Amino acid sequence: MDRRQFNFIQAFTLATLAGMQLQAHALTLADLTNMDASKGLKTALEKGASSAISVLSAPNGYLGNEKVRIPLPGYLQDAANMLRTLGQGARLDELVEAMNRGAEASVPLAKDLLTKAVQTMTVTDAKGILQGGDTAVTQFFADKTRVDLGVKFLPVVTKATAKIGLAEKYNQLAGKASEFGLIKKEDANIQQYVTGKTLDGLYFMIAEEEKKIRQNPVAYGSSILTKVFGALK
């Protein structure tokens, strides 16, 4: 056989094998089984929830993080400068700290409900969630747990803010203001306001983790995350 012909056949064979190998590794979403998609999503949910709870429940998890720090409600924020001139500055600062400490104390209570939510996801839903956008996994969490977590968080938040007399005064003033449409009803109660903001912060941090997983699944050292989220590239 002519050497040039042999080299051509050899090169063609190698190229074909390489192409087959690349095709085998370049999985697409359609190549994933529902079971793999479900397992990958559950792993992402667990990692996102665990990371968010760990960060937010640490000292200053809310208070020291500008992205989730709970500010004074809008109505009180607008009046803050005037209240500070009346000698209420220290009390306002105490209220802000109490609100954020209440959030930090309540977040660990989310673990059981978030874990349970992971288990409720069906394999048939998995691919739909995967294709739902950068924070679709987090939205699944929020839809499944927000109402129940609000019920669990509220007593902890109430206990934290009860130590500050200004909180009760706020509720009285804000309640009147809401009757005239000056503030939203959900902001008229400081405990409800803080509970809502606590949940917002929790889902925000889960979403941040989800985005990282989607962008670089290999960094997590998990073969299932790499397989599932790599198929979305």
Image: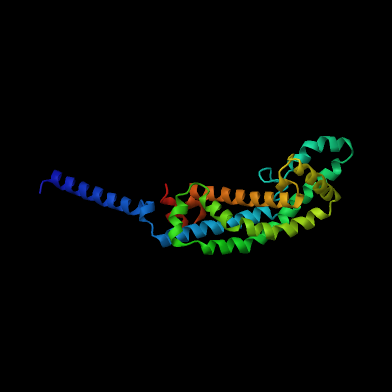
Q: How is the image coloured?
A: rainbow
x, y percentage for residue 219? 50, 51
Q: Image check: 20 left or right of 89?
A: left
Q: Measuring 48% from the left and 51% from the top, which residue is drawn there? A: 217
x, y percentage for residue 159? 79, 58
Q: Residue furthest front?
A: 180
Q: Image check: 139 left or right of 106?
A: left
Asked whether residue 213 appears in the rendered view, the answer is yes
Comparing 184 with 146, the one in front is 184
Q: How many callouts does the rendering have?
A: 0
Residue 34 image-quadrant placement: bottom left
Comparing 19 with 193, the one in front is 193
Asked whether residue 223 appears in the rendered view, the answer is no
Q: Is residue 95 above or below residue 221?
A: above
Q: Measuring 62% from the left and 54% from the top, which residue is drawn there? A: 52
Comparing 148 with 33, the one in front is 148
x, y percentage for residue 165? 86, 50
Q: Measuring 77% from the left and 39% from the top, which residue is drawn there? A: 77
Q: Measuring 66% from the left and 43% from the top, which residue is drawn there? A: 67
Q: Residue furthest right?
A: 87
Comparing 20 with 204, the one in front is 204
Q: Residue furthest left?
A: 1
x, y percentage for residue 107? 68, 57
Q: Is residue 180 above or below residue 47?
A: above
